[in-house]
Image (spheres, helix red, strand yellow):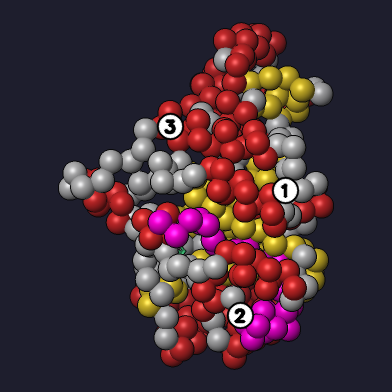
Amino acid sequence: MMGLYVHIPFCRHKCIYCHFISGIPYNEERAERYIDFLLQEAKLYRFLYGHLHFHTLYLGGGTPSLLSERLLFRLVEGLSSLFTLEAEERTLEVNPEDVNEEHLTMWKKAGFTRLSLGFQAVQPELLAFLSRPLFDPDKTYEMVREKGFSKVSVDFIVGTPLLHTHKLLKWIRKHLPPHLSLYLLSCESGSTLAGLERQGLFSPPPEEFQAKQYLTLAKKLSCLYEWYEISNFSMGTQNRSLHNSLYWAYEPYIGLGIGASGFLSWKKFRYTNTIHLPLYERLLQKEHFPYGYEETLGEKTEKMEKLMLGLRTSEGIPLSTLKEWATEKGWQAFERTVQRLAPYLEYYEEKLILTPEGRMVANTLITELWCTLEPFL
Ligand code: SF4
């Protein structure tokens, strides 16, 4: 299985919490030029690896739902002429203010089977704090479903005192979206919030508060949803994001566009494209891959990544894999660490998984486990 990710960096404005490669003001001419470069980049992969077969397509951003019909078709048709794109899961990230009858028809016609709706909140005061445009969550969601999109994911931001969890749960229980992504509000460098924090004008909510709010929601959702990855919930396995699951399962994917990442598993090669648009264009004009970072993974890095990605998911990591990696002494040391971290980790059906509390401190746990294991590999 292989995925194709395409990054569209245009937005109407930059939201205060956003640290993604995004926020480039949209105009038709600028977007057309960018799409021509995206197709140029795709041609390099075609030239090097032949007619690739992608099981999933994911248009993320930025705000891909800003693309006009002409440009969206130009992109999808251009990619389809170079590669085989399976119709099973083609996701488009959509901002609620772009949802209307005309756009929904266009996205369907362009072959998208799944919409990822960036709601972020259902409370007007929280939308205002997040610097997001106001919209009607009920009407927007109902319009999407009435248009026949059955695979729908909705994103929400959690971890702020302004969020009334009962209001969010009420909305979720009313509409029952088949997939949810819940992200903690963060102050990542590059975001406006991080700048405000530096100037002493904003204090991020304490981590303990955020974890408690997230866990409360996650536990209440657990009777309806499967919490299958740290930030993702689905109604049964059939509603999981196939595309994102490829990342966690260590399957290959290609990323096109500024800041996009890819993993060519057959040569253990990871890359992230440059985030600078002029450099991206210059490199492609010279027919070079626009990499800003590239790495061929050594054996140890590969194991570390598998541990990290596996533990993010409800699948965890098989004990047989861990035993295969470590010496007898290493396995004993590893087991002692697991016992020490017991409230956060557990063995389940011959696999090591994170408990719900463990998911809130996943990075610390993974570092501890890796530091125990690494000297014995
Ligand atoms: S949160 Fe979404 S819409 Fe807002 S700036 Fe970031 S990518 Fe653009």
| Residue 282 visible here | no
Q: Earlier in the sequence, mark 3 or mark 1?
A: 3
**Label 3 to label 1: alpha-carbon separation:** 25 Å
Q: Which mark is residue 234?
A: 1
Circles 2 and 1: CB distance less than 8 Å? no
Name the image quarter holding the N terminus.
bottom right
Hey, which residue is sitting farthest left in the picture?
199
Dot 3 surroundings within 10 Å: few (below 14), some, or many (20 or more)? few
| Whether residue 149 is situated above or below residue 74 in the rendered picture | above
**Could you say which is closer to the camera, residue 317 or residue 11?**
11
**Label 2 to label 1: alpha-carbon separation:** 25 Å
Amino acid at circle 1:
Ser
Q: Earlier in the sequence, mark 2 or mark 1?
A: 2
Q: Earlier in the sequence, mark 3 or mark 2?
A: 2
List x then y, in percent, for residue 241. 71, 54
Q: Which residue is mark 3?
A: 209
List x then y, in percent, for residue 292. 43, 60
Amino acid at circle 2:
Asn
**Could you say which is closer to the camera, residue 208 or residue 223?**
223
Can you tell which of label 2 and label 1 is closer to the viewer? 2
**Could you say which is closer to the camera, residue 196 or residue 273?**
196
Q: Which residues are magenta?
A: 101-125
Dot 1 surroundings within 10 Å: few (below 14), some, or many (20 or more)? many
Circles 3 and 2: CB distance less than 8 Å? no
Q: Secondary structure at mark 1?
A: strand
Q: Is residue 142 left or right of residue 320?
A: left
List x then y, in percent, for residue 354. 64, 27
Can you tell which of label 3 and label 1 is closer to the viewer? 3
Amino acid at circle 3:
Phe
**Quadrant containing ligand 1:** bottom left
Q: Which residue is mark 2?
A: 100
List x then y, in percent, for residue 235. 77, 48
